[in-house]
Image (cartoon, helix red, strand yellow):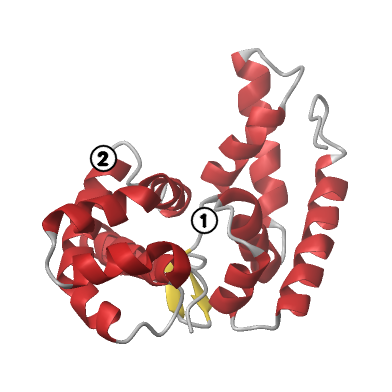
Amino acid sequence: MTGDLSETGPLLQRAGAGDAQALGELFARYRDRLRQMVRLRLDRRLQGRIDPSDVLQEVYLDFAKRLPEYAADPSMAFYLWLRSVTGQRLIDLHRQHLGAKMRDAGQEVSLYRGALPQASSVSLAAQLLGRLTSASRAAIRAETQIRVQEVLNGMDPLDREVLTLRHFEMLSNEETAAVLGIKKSAASNRYVRALKRLKELLAGIPGFDYP
């Protein structure tokens, strides 16, 4: 049985039965988390051309269309299902706007429940730069961002994905394990190792204070 039905159950039942207000409330509950996911995984070539809010409007239409089927037979935790709907919309948008360029290496990461756009190193670096304490000038920040991106690009893809899920999308260990199709203990161990490795790699960047 899904892990978050106790929180979403009544609202989900109403929304699945066609209650438009419940549908909107249910989606609004997870909008901020989904927006963060979209920001991280929207290809850098589309940033500035496509707004995450516009993506979420399309996701909402997909969500409204597919919810009755999910509500009748929930096969995974609700948020993970909603996240997968969002991921498929991102894949479709990337293919629509980038076409054959989607075949470039590293554009998608294969996961247990299918492919998903890989979190951009540019987006991840921007998130990490929020922790900078001394690199405040634009030139220094730009140089630092490039170095952070290089560090991220050099990481094992699965390690980077675990960090993205846990550290930036704020998924729980249980949710991360479900997404990756691995045991909870394996997901936890992988995250600890990946975080330790990231800290080691970032330690050599001047002005970067990563706790």
The residue labelled by disc 2 is 49
The residue labelled by disc 1 is 119
Q: Which tag, 2 or 1, sits closer to the chain's start?
A: 2
SS label for mark 2: loop
160 sits left or right of 119 in the view? right
- Considering depth in this image, is 45 or 164 the residue closer to the camera? 164
- Residue plotted at (77% across, 17% down): 134
- Residue plotted at (22% across, 82% down): 69
- Considering depth in this image, is 194 or 107 the residue closer to the camera? 194
In the image, residue 167 lies at what x, y percent? Answer: 65, 51
In the image, residue 147 lies at what x, y percent? Answer: 70, 38
In the image, residue 82 lies at what x, y percent? Answer: 36, 66
- Considering depth in this image, is 72 or 39 the residue closer to the camera? 72
Residue 180, placed above or below residue 8: below
Q: In this view, which residue lies farthest toward the top?
A: 137
Quadrant location of the C terminus? top right
- Residue plotted at (46% across, 68% down): 6
In the image, residue 203 lies at what x, y percent? Answer: 87, 39
- Residue plotted at (44% across, 76% down): 115
Whether residue 197 is visible: yes
Label 1 CA crowd tier, 10 Å (few <14, some 14–19, many 20+): many
13 sits left or right of 112 in the view? left
Amino acid type, callout 1 = Ala
SS label for mark 1: loop
Residue 204, placed above or below residue 26: above
Residue 183, placed above or below residue 62: below
